[in-house]
Image (cartoon, grey):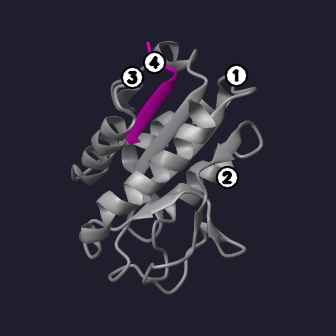
Amino acid sequence: MNNIAILYGSSGGNAASVARQVQDLFDGKADIFNVLEVTLDEIKDYPYYVIGTSTTGIGDLQDDWEGFLPSFARMDLAGKKVAIFALGDSASYSTSFAESMKVVYDEIKDKVRIVGQVADEGYTYDSSTAVIEGTWIGLPIDEDNEYDLTQERLEKWVESLKNEFI
């Protein structure tokens, strides 16, 4: 078991693909779990979590997380650190871009230390509840319109997380 658990929920496969990229960037020091298949017992001992979700509809949490997140939030999360990434479509849903990360954030923010916030620079969208005082609460990814920026964004983000996690 590594110290980092990457937990993802994915409907179309993009969040799963990004989660695997994050795992690769941690150089073998992270384990990956689909929330549709994992149990709380399998992940309870990890000190660090990376949570990944796609955003469905207008800012909605990915379906698999709907069932898993309440249970995850009831775990003993004292002393744990969590980073969040969310996929979204900044063109078609420019007023709710990557808002699923805010749903996750709201559920766990009082129980863990949230890390991995990202400056709101270089993104094209109109508004998002996942931006607080000019900073994203996690990493937004747009595989529909800004796929050419994903690798660079992930590399920079994971490097910052390594300072927190490793």
Magenta stretch: helix, strand or loop mostly: strand
- The residue to which callout 4 is attached is 2
Disc 4, SS: loop
Tag 3 and tag 1, C-beta contact below 8 Å: no
- The residue to which callout 1 is attached is 76
At 53% from the left edge and 39% from the top edge, which residue is drawn?
Answer: 162
Q: Is residue 97 left or right of residue 13?
A: right
Tell me: residue 59, above or below residue 109: below
Q: CA distance from mark 3 to mark 2?
A: 22 Å
- The residue to which callout 2 is attached is 106
At 36% from the left edge and 29% from the top edge, which residue is drawn?
Answer: 32
Tell me: residue 130, above or below residue 124: above
Which badge, 1 or 4, comes first in the chain's sequence? 4
Which residue occupies the extreme bottom position in the image? 126
Label number found at residue 38: 3
Tell me: residue 100, above or below residue 19: below
Which badge, 2 or 1, comes first in the chain's sequence? 1
Pointer 4: residues within 10 angstroms few (<14), some, or many (20+)?
Answer: few
Which badge, 3 or 1, comes first in the chain's sequence? 3
Q: Is residue 108 left or right of residue 84?
A: right
Q: Nearer the viewer, residue 101 or 19?
A: 19
Identify which amino acid the numbered label 2 is placed on: Asp
Which badge, 3 or 4, comes first in the chain's sequence? 4
Q: Is residue 55 visible?
A: no
Which span of residues is magenta-colored?
1-8
Identify which amino acid the numbered label 1 is placed on: Asp
Q: Is residue 137 visible?
A: yes
Q: CA distance from mark 1 to mark 4?
A: 19 Å
Q: CA distance from mark 3 to mark 4?
A: 16 Å
